[in-house]
Image (spheres, grey):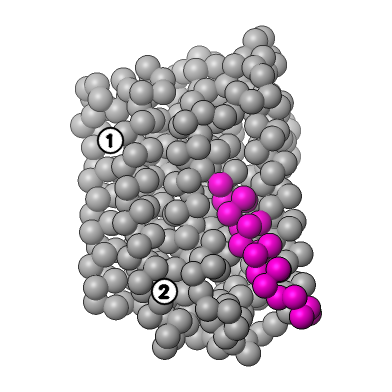
């Protein structure tokens, strides 16, 4: 269908996948951030309270990762077939990190060798976060395609830009983890979370600026979209709002607000996510495959849409209920 915009089932499915990916970033981002912060917390009560703050919800958060990956395979099979071979190595590392992290989450409560499993929890969290950023960077920088297949080498994902994105995601998830602790904990742990939020907030702001400045130079279309009229006028509110969210975040920290830092950090993530989406749309494989070229047949999309329309509200409902039931401050005795 070329590059013309046509609001149809394919666009709806692109929106569903974008929602699933962002929901994963929001919900699993902060609990991966908890693991990233682990070495900066005191062993014993601080780490126990930190784990207890996510214990009731951490495994359910990864539902959105399944929806995103499964939705890509079902709704956009051509893009799935091209992207996965290009990023097999970081994806496998991500899955191993998540598995190792999940095992460590359970074992640390039932062993006398807790420091080993604390390190495993930290390492799995860092690996999972870093590789997610690497995959994002690899897709943004472009994938070699010949015909309808990936034509690059197995290490094509590895570049300075993908490593920058990987480090940025680690820092950003660390920020979400610190903000979550501000909201869910109190006393000395909350005080430490405030200090960590300042540190990771500055790091995240620098990382967002660095990735934002590098992205337009990856593809000529990116540069044209952001720096040529009329795009520069239409899209200029995105970085301005991101800057306002960052300023609001630091102001909320200085006032020792509890919930506002977390919400403003999410707003910064959302605006960054929108910016990356604007750069890529309507491509799933930049410069090669649009969402319409990659899409499954309309009947298949409609069939899947019916199931998604039922299941996504159910997932949102049970997730919201879990967060509501386990709201409030936690202590080291917690829920586990």
Q: In screen coordinates, is 140 left or right of 278? A: right
Q: In screen coordinates, is 270 left or right of 307? A: left
Secondary structure of the residue carrying tag 2 is: helix
- The main secondary structure of the magenta stretch is helix
Q: How would you rate the neighbour count of disc 2 (Cα within 10 Å): few for under 14, some for 14-19, many for 20 or more? A: many
Q: Quadrant of residue 214?
A: top left
In this rendering, is residue 265 above or below 253?
Answer: above
Q: Gap in Å between the C-alphas at discs 1 and 2?
A: 34 Å
Q: Residue at x 67, y 72 (%)?
A: 115
Query: Quick one: label 1 or label 2, which is nearer the N terminus?
Result: 2
Q: Residue at x 24, y 77 (%)?
A: 255
> Residue 61: x, y in percent?
63, 62
Q: Quadrant of residue 70?
A: top right
Residue 322 sits inside the magenta stretch: no
The residue pinned by badge 2 equals 193
Residue 8 appearing in the image: no
Quarter holding the C terminus is: bottom right
Residue 94 appearing in the image: yes
Secondary structure of the residue carrying tag 1 is: helix
Q: Which mark is residue 235?
A: 1
> Residue 233: x, y in percent?
21, 32
Q: Residue at x 51, y 66 (%)?
A: 37
> Residue 105: x, y in percent?
70, 69
């Amino acid at each position: 269908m070329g590059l013309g915009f046509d609001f149809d089932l394919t666009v709806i499915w692109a929106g569903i996948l974008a929602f699933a990916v962002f929901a994963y970033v929001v919900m699993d981002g902060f609990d991966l951030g908890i693991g990233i912060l682990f070495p900066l917390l005191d062993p014993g009560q601080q780490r126990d309270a930190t784990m207890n703050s996510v214990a009731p919800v951490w495994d359910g958060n990864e539902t959105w990762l399944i929806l995103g990956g499964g939705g890509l395979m079902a709704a956009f099979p051509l893009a799935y077939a091209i992207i996965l071979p290009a990023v097999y190595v970081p994806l496998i590392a991500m899955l191993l990190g998540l598995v190792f992290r999940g095992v460590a989450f359970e074992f640390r409560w039932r062993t006398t060798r807790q420091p080993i499993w604390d390190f495993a929890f930290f390492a799995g969290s860092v690996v999972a976060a870093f590789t997610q950023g690497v995959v994002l960077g690899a897709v943004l920088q472009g994938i070699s395609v010949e015909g309808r297949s990936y034509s690059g080498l197995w290490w094509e994902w590895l570049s300075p830009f993908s490593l920058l994105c990987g480090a940025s995601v680690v820092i950003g998830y660390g920020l979400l983890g610190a903000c979550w602790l501000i909201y869910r904990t109190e006393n000395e742990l909350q005080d430490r979370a405030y200090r960590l939020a300042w540190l990771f907030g500055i790091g995240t702001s620098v990382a967002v600026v660095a990735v934002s400045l590098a992205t337009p130079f990856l593809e000529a279309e990116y540069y044209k979209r952001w720096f040529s009229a009329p795009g520069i006028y239409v899209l200029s509110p995105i970085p301005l709002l991101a800057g306002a969210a960052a300023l609001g975040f630091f102001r909320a920290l200085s006032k020792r607000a509890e919930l506002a830092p977390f919400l403003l950090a999410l707003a910064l993530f959302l605006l960054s996510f929108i910016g990356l989406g604007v750069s890529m749309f309507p491509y799933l494989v930049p410069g090669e495959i649009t969402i319409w070229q990659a899409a499954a047949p309309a009947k298949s999309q409609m069939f899947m849409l019916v199931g998604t329309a039922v299941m996504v509200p159910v997932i949102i409902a049970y997730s919201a209920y879990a967060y509501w039931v386990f709201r409030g401050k936690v202590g080291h005795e917690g829920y586990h």
